[in-house]
Image (cartoon, grey):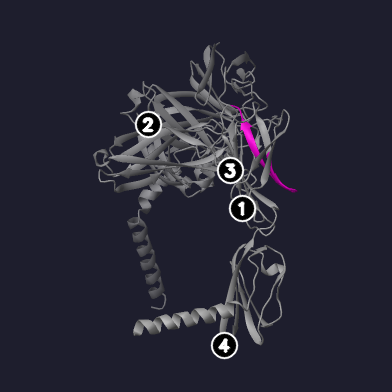
Amino acid sequence: MGNWKTICLAVLCAAISTAYAADLQAPAQVTAGTAFTIPTSGSGDRTFYLVGPSSVVKKSVKLGSEIEIAADQVHAAGRYVAVSCGSEGCSSASFYVVSGSPAKVSFLLHPSRVPVTAHDAINATAFVFDKFHNPVLRPVEVDFRVVPKAGPAFTKSVKAVQGVAWMKMSPTPKEGPVKIIATIGSNEEPRIIRQVASDACNLHIKARRTAKGVEVETDPVKDCRSNSVPDGTVVSFTAVDSNGKSTVDAPVKKGVARTELPITGKAIISVASGVVTGNEIRL
Amino acid sequence: MKVVLPILIAVMTAGLIGIAWVQSGGVASREISAGRTPEEAVEALMRDVQARNWNSAYSRLANTNALEKQDFIRDLSGSNGSLRTYSSLQSFTVWPLHATDQEATMRVRMTWSSAIGPLDEVRDLHLQRENDAWKVLWPKPNLAKVPPQVIPVNYLRWDVIGRTLGDDWGVQNVDPPNVRITSMNAIERPEGVVLVGELVNEDTVPAYVSVNATLLSPDQTTIDQESSFDTIAHTLLPRQVSPYRIDFPGVRIKQVKNVRMDVKALLVAASADPVIAVTDQKIEKDALGAILLRGNLVNQSGQNVDIAQVVAAYYDANGKVIWVSNGYVDQALLPQVPVPFGVDVPKDIAPKVQSYHVVVNHYSRNNG
């Protein structure tokens, strides 16, 4: 007997709920940032609530007229619930706000510096958003424009999947800054990646006697692809003479590293940069 | 009676003052002050230096006609923002080396307290007798004078632009530098376990590095955690190699099962200058029998370096780092002027040393 009572109560509640739900006739889907109206039926004053992912709106409405929803009340994409409450209870309807047209791109580019020899080492990832920062989940094309320091620029178009477009690429052959611009519509996000030379190759020094000692200088320090190593790269000069050992960690400036060692007699001078060693000079 | 009582009180007061003076070492102090023995003369000089009583100290010298007072003061109190200018004489020990009736040689070990800890300095001082007193022949300091000149420097520095408050979340900072530990050697010393090794900045930008290490027991619990502190070159230019040493006092190596190393590298704005040459490096014994790596530092740039620190790695025949030592230089490095340095090498390690590598940290008031 108790079960029958429960079932009847549930059916009654469902019927009332359905009847109230019919008060609000919300659209199934709305584009973010677009004003729209929710038609209502019935009569009397009610309090209207619009509960969204990041906002709640409350206002008094009259049933039977249309409830106007302003554009700025539906900026955030997601599920919204419209509720109207009166003395006899509440009714509700839900609808979805979807992202608008692509308007912004957030761009992650890794790494910041990459040796020119590193294969597929550049990773570019773009996230597509509408103008209200809602991720645009439908497929849209993102252009990655690559502008090397030397050589022609080129563009690679990638279709975003679930709001994300990404690509891998190898560095261009020459060292230097490379600008990569992610573009969607008129929105551009530039990033700089610095392509750098690999380890020094064929490190070579020459020496000449001066009034103060011996001036030692490298040839232009380059990697095996003839890219100049970045200025500031430390080159270690070592001289061994009768007074002992002398060392100088000199940075490459304008492509060469040089120093002056206070050597007057016989000496052996060698050079290294990181793990790379160069030639040896006997004076 | 009216006269006798004040006289009596005055006499008694004078007597008490006299007793107090004798009891407080006044006699001995006067003897020392007078420099009746070579040892007393040096001690008196050192006390004046300790008190920074330069007039009195200078008056104890035998060669005031050949030595300017300002040079004497600069020799002991430092100049040009050097570490010595931030130091004071904490203590000293004097012992005789040689003495005759008219001349003597005394050795003095001065311990200076400085911002980076105590610094020892040993000097041999010659004395000569003048009448009844001994006076010190203070060696004329070799104070470098840099002639007016222009030193051209192609100034190279790196500046870093980071993200700002207004940037979107997709605007990431520039990646930190890629720094790698190339070697690590755990050795047991009487004072505890010591980790020594080297690391290299493999990147093309400068890095501010620090190395931390955690010693783990067989059950993987932490025994101790320490950092390299100042026994490392913290700012590494591209491809620069630095030694590091991490001390774990009181830990025995048999307690240790694993070592966890952690190198932290930050991208920092830095300058490639000054370049400091390390010349005439030699391992040799000093007057006290200690083994030192000695050499000269030459500032090849045009700006003064106020405080320099030497960090040296020592390798065995297999190229393995077997020790790292460091030491501060208490003289400023003026442009192009060689400044001597010396860092300790433990006596048991010195015979195994086949080669060494020296790096120099530098600090200046003007450019940090």
Q: Position of residue B108 (x, y in %)?
A: 40, 37
Is label 3 on the same chain as label 2? yes
Q: Amino acid at mark 1?
A: Leu
Q: Amino acid at mark 4?
A: Glu
> Of discs 4 and 2, which sits in the foreground?
4
- Magenta residue check for A190: yes
| Chain letter for mark 4 | A
Q: Secondary structure at mark 3?
A: loop
Q: Which quadrant holds the C terminus of chain A?
A: top right
Is label 1 on the same chain as label 4? yes
Which of B259/B240 is in front? B259
Please name the residue shown 52% across and 37% down the image: B178
Q: CA distance from mark 3 to mark 2?
A: 29 Å
Q: Which mark is residue B323?
A: 2
Q: Is residue B108 above or below residue A45?
A: above
Which of B176/A160 is in front? A160
> Of discs 3 and 4, which sits in the foreground?
4
Q: Is residue B223 above or below residue A251?
A: below
What kind of secondary structure does the magenta stretch mostly adopt? strand
**Structural crowding at the residue carrying mark 1, measured as other residues with C-alpha within 10 Å and reported as few (<14), some (14–19) or many (≥20):** some
Please name the residue that numbered disc 4 is placed on.
A88
| Chain letter for mark 1 | A
Specify the segment rendered in magenta. A180-197
Please name the residue that numbered disc 3 is placed on.
B268
